[in-house]
Image (cartoon, rainbow, N blue to C red):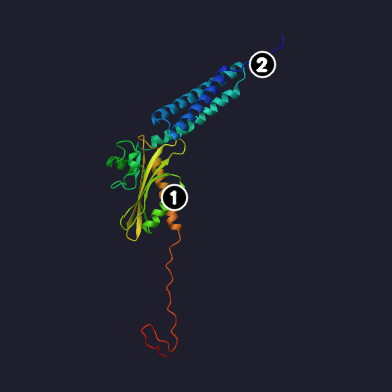
């Protein structure tokens, strides 16, 4: 009796299910990201969908290892399908695992500001934020922030407030944040204020930002507040956003050309015998 060729042997069903679960998890994860970024549903159902995708990814990894054992012992084909399930499962779990390590190292706070004594207030964006999340949490959160992010502090510049405000507004626009309100500093209004909405790169979570530009002496002081709309742990995103923007504002203002004063106009020379401005003839 002729022996069957290798390619005629049935593929490992365990390997097939590993790849199927991984592909299904990938589709579910992509769907949840689309839901969050588009705002089609509330954030809680969208996050539950993403969590389900991670569960399927974990199952795909476990079944892939089971498939490796079956393939090794029985010599059936299916190694490629098992490797596909393992790879996709690890890809889906890699970023959440990274975020989990950050959550263990950082405090569970989601409202960061450079001025904990007098934080900038949300006014226009207050209507978009959930109830009870407009006011700064208080001294307990401030103490946690100082311990975890001691470098988050106001930015003081040797530049006029209008120059600092324009630099901040240009950088917010460059980052493609949604600008809810922008009020430049004027003689009637001492402080300049920018309110904007930033989004996380993958899931598209909305974080609200307010920037305050205050004149101090001949320069300006910039305070900033970045707060998440949902959740009690921002995984360091708000502090990173403040740190990055203030550094860019400092660089932009420092590299900006200094305004030049207009040259003084010299009076034309007075000719001999010609009367000067007072009507007296010029002396020889």
Q: In what quadrant of the picture does the C terminus appear?
A: bottom left
Q: Which residue is painted at 46% across and 48% down in the image?
A: 174
Note whether 141 is above or below 215 in the view shown.
above
Query: Residue shown at 43%/56% (left/top)?
Result: 253
Picture coordinates of residue 190 (x, y %)? 31, 55
Expressed as whole percent of the image width and height from the top left, the position of residue 237 reads 41, 40
For label 2, the crowd category at 10 Å Cα-Cα, with few meaning under 14, some 14 to 19 and many 20 or more, is few
Q: Secondary structure at mark 1?
A: helix
Give the residue displayed 35% in from the left and 59% down from the top.
219
**Residue 264, quarter of the rendered image:** bottom left
The extreme right residue here reads 2
Residue sitting at x 43%, y 35%: 99
Q: Which of the two discs, 1 and 2, labels the residue nearer the N terminus?
A: 2
Q: Say if 269 sits above or below 131 in the image.
A: below
Rendering coords of residue 116 (x, y %): 30, 46
Which label belongs to residue 8? 2
Q: Are marks 1 and 2 in contact (CB under 8 Å)?
A: no
Compared across the picture, whether 79 is left or right of 40 comes to right
Which residue is under mark 1? 171
Q: Name the outermost residue toward the bottom.
A: 284
Mark 1 neighbour density, 10 Å: few (under 14) some (14–19) many (20 or more): some
Q: Residue furthest top?
A: 1
The quarter of the rendered structure image containing the N terminus is: top right
């Amino acid at each position: 009796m002729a022996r069957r060729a290798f390619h005629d042997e049935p593929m490992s069903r365990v390997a097939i299910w590993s790849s199927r679960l991984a592909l299904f998890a990938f589709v579910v994860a992509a769907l949840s990201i689309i839901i969050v970024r588009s705002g089609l549903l509330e954030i809680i159902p969208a996050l539950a969908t993403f969590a389900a995708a991670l569960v399927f990814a974990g199952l795909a990894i476990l079944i892939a290892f089971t498939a490796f054992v079956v393939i090794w012992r029985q010599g059936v084909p299916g190694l490629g399908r098992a490797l596909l399930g393992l790879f996709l499962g690890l890809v889906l779990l890699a970023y959440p695992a990274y975020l989990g390590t950050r959550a263990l190292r950082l405090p569970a706070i989601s409202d960061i500001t450079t001025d904990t004594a007098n934080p900038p207030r949300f006014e226009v964006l207050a209507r978009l934020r959930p109830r009870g999340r407009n006011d700064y949490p208080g001294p307990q959160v401030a103490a946690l922030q100082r311990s975890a992010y001691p470098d988050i502090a106001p930015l003081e510049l040797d530049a006029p407030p209008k120059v600092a405000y324009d630099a901040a507004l240009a950088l917010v626009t460059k980052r493609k944040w949604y600008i809810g309100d922008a009020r430049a500093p004027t003689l009637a209004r001492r402080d300049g204020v920018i309110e904007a909405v930033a989004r996380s790169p993958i899931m598209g979570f909305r974080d609200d930002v307010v920037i305050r530009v205050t004149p101090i002496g001949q320069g300006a002081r910039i305070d900033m507040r970045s707060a998440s709309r949902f959740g009690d742990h921002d995984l360091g995103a708000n502090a990173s956003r403040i740190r990055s923007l203030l550094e860019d504002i400092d660089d932009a203002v420092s590299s900006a050309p200094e305004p030049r004063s207009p040259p003084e106009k010299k009076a034309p020379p007075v000719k001999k015998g010609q009367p000067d401005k007072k009507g007296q003839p010029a002396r020889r």
